[in-house]
């Protein structure tokens, strides 16, 4: 959409900011060209975010160039920031002036709502850090405390609001993270140092926008907040924060005999209300800041429920995927919302991937993460909300360098075969000249054709073998086929299933039909 506006000459900061939020949201919540799935951070370490491989990296570079073009810094402001030591390393937390609404580049770490939380809470609720440090366990919490200690940040400092932390600590935070991160296998935690003169490339840097003294939000912050409003809403039981200040009320009432139909109708009305609330908040700093506690409460619930599932070993490994059900706890009403359940599934998927990697199972399967099916019971309507999460990004994660290397190998093989055929032909010609036997020409020509065909066949076989090996290595990074598998199960069984979501990998299944549904689903190819 931004490209279209640019072609028409109508681009501005507001449209650019919306485009950046869209890209940031896609990166955060696993929406890739192969369906909703995990991002393979190991394969995409060179592009920091890892979203759709090299294509995502190019898109982010274009957005950074657009930010520079539409938001040129003033010399007086640049000089003032340099004198404060804030131009290169510090994360901006305030506007340059009361009228400043510009977009800036910022070396954003992979934390959650850093400007609006304490450093400790921001790190604790980061899905990336949670998975890498095993934050759901007591040793993981101790590992986080030790990481902060090695950075020279006391628990008293890191547990107070980030904006109130010591200025020197904030100024040196990025450099300290770059020093400590490799010790814990967190190379992608912060953007790498700039490689160009003057730091014009800023690969992996994030985006920040301020609205005067009203608010200063990163694009990732806005994506998290808007996601909470859009997918959870402000009137959902299970969250303590409500924008209207009233106590939450259950979304569905089971008092009526047609409670299921009433629940469906109410859910549709809630979805429409959530959409317009999120739409109005997109460019409203007041609405965004009011919804920050909502987003914080959602991610507290994700950490709490995910930790409970892992500690109680409630995740089972079936034939084609792992499976878990949310059936108890204070957050069950919250996760009857597909958006919240998908976020929990992504959090669990990252955790499982890291555990499998540590156990060595990931190597045995050839890489990737096991697909995950996560369900949550909605007692009021008598259904389970079920989401299917693919194991990882698909073929789009192949980088340009990998493609060029494969093409180079193919050309080298062709040149080698051509030289070999030419040498054989020359040897035969010399042999004929020495023997002087013209009657051998026909036989030699036939032999030459057979040799060329054999060489071509060998080259083709080598290409196919290489492609098969690559496919085998990446079989866990295929397209998310849960949507197709869900429909096939519905057609083959009598399970009562409702397919009514923007995401094809989200369904509702009657409680009594769930076991048969999962049994049939386990026989399907859920990643392909």
Image: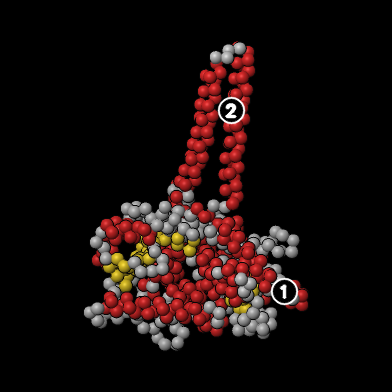
The residue under label 2 is: 421
Residue 116's x, y, as percent? 56, 77
Examine the rendered structure and indicate whether residue 510 appears above or below residue 474.
Answer: below
Q: Secondary structure at mark 2?
A: helix
Residue 416 position, x and y percent, is 60, 33
Q: Left of 209 or right of it: where is 246? A: left
Q: Among all residues in the image, which is located at the extreme left?
A: 257
**x 60%, y 64%: residue:** 60
Foreground residue among 211 and 346: 211
The residues bearing labels 1 and 2 have C-alpha atoms spaced at a distance of 63 Å
Residue 101, located in which quarter of the rendered image? bottom right
Task: Out of 1 and 166, give the one closest to the viewer.
Answer: 1
Give the residue number, with chain letter if any, for mark 1.
73
In terms of depth relative to the viewer, which is nearer, 301 or 192?
192
Drawn side of residue 58 relative to residue 38, left or right: right
Q: Is residue 158 above or below residue 486?
A: below
> Measured from the top left, where is residue 192 in percent x and y?
64, 61
């Amino acid at each position: 959409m931004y490209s279209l506006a640019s072609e028409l000459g109508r681009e501005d900061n507001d449209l650019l900011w919306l485009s950046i939020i869209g890209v940031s949201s896609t990166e955060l919540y696993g929406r890739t060209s192969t369906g909703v799935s995990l991002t393979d951070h190991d394969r995409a370490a060179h592009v920091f975010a890892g979203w759709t491989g090299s294509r995502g990296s190019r898109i982010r570079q274009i957005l950074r160039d657009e930010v520079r073009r539409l938001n040129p810094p003033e010399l007086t402001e640049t000089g003032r920031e340099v004198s404060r030591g804030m131009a290169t390393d510090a994360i901006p937390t305030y506007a340059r002036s009361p009228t400043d609404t510009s977009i800036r580049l910022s070396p954003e770490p992979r934390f959650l709502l850093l400007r609006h939380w304490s450093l400790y809470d921001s790190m604790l609720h980061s899905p990336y850090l949670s998975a890498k440090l095993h934050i759901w366990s007591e040793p993981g919490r101790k590992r986080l405390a030790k990481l902060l200690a090695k950075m020279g940040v006391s628990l008293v400092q890191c547990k107070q609001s980030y904006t109130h932390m010591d200025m020197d600590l904030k100024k040196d935070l990025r450099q300290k993270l770059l020093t400590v991160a490799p010790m814990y296998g967190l190379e992608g935690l912060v953007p790498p140092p700039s490689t160009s003169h003057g730091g014009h490339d800023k690969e992996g840097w994030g985006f920040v926008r301020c609205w005067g003294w009203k608010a200063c939000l990163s694009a990732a912050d806005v994506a998290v907040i808007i996601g909470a409003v859009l997918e959870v809403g402000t009137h959902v039981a299970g969250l303590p924060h409500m924008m209207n200040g009233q106590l939450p009320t259950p979304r569905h009432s089971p008092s009526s005999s047609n409670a299921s139909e009433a629940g469906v109708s109410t859910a549709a009305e809630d979805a429409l209300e959530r959409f317009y609330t999120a739409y109005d908040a997109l460019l409203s700093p007041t609405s965004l800041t009011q919804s920050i506690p909502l987003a914080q409460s959602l991610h507290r619930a994700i950490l709490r429920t995910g930790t409970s599932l892992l500690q109680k070993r409630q995740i089972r490994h079936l034939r084609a995927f792992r499976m878990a059900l949310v059936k108890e706890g204070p957050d069950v009403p919250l996760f009857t919302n597909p958006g919240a359940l998908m976020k929990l599934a992504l959090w669990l998927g990252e955790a499982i991937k890291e555990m499998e990697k540590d156990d060595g199972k990931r190597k045995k399967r050839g890489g990737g993460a096991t697909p995950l099916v996560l369900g949550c019971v909605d007692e009021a309507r008598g259904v389970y909300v079920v989401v299917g999460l693919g194991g990882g990004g698909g073929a789009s994660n192949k980088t340009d360098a990998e493609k060029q290397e494969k093409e180079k190998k193919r050309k080298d093989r062709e040149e080698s075969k051509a030289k070999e055929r030419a040498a054989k032909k020359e040897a035969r010609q010399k042999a004929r000249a020495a023997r002087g036997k013209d009657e051998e020409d026909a036989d030699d020509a036939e032999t030459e054709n057979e040799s060329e065909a054999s060489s071509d066949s060998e080259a083709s076989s080598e290409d196919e073998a290489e492609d098969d090996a690559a496919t085998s290595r990446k079989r866990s990074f295929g397209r998310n086929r849960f949507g197709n598998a869900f429909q096939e199960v519905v057609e083959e069984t009598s399970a009562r299933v409702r397919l009514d979501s923007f995401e094809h990998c989200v369904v509702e299944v009657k409680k009594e039909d769930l076991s048969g549904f999962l049994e049939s689903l386990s026989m399907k190819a859920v990643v392909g």
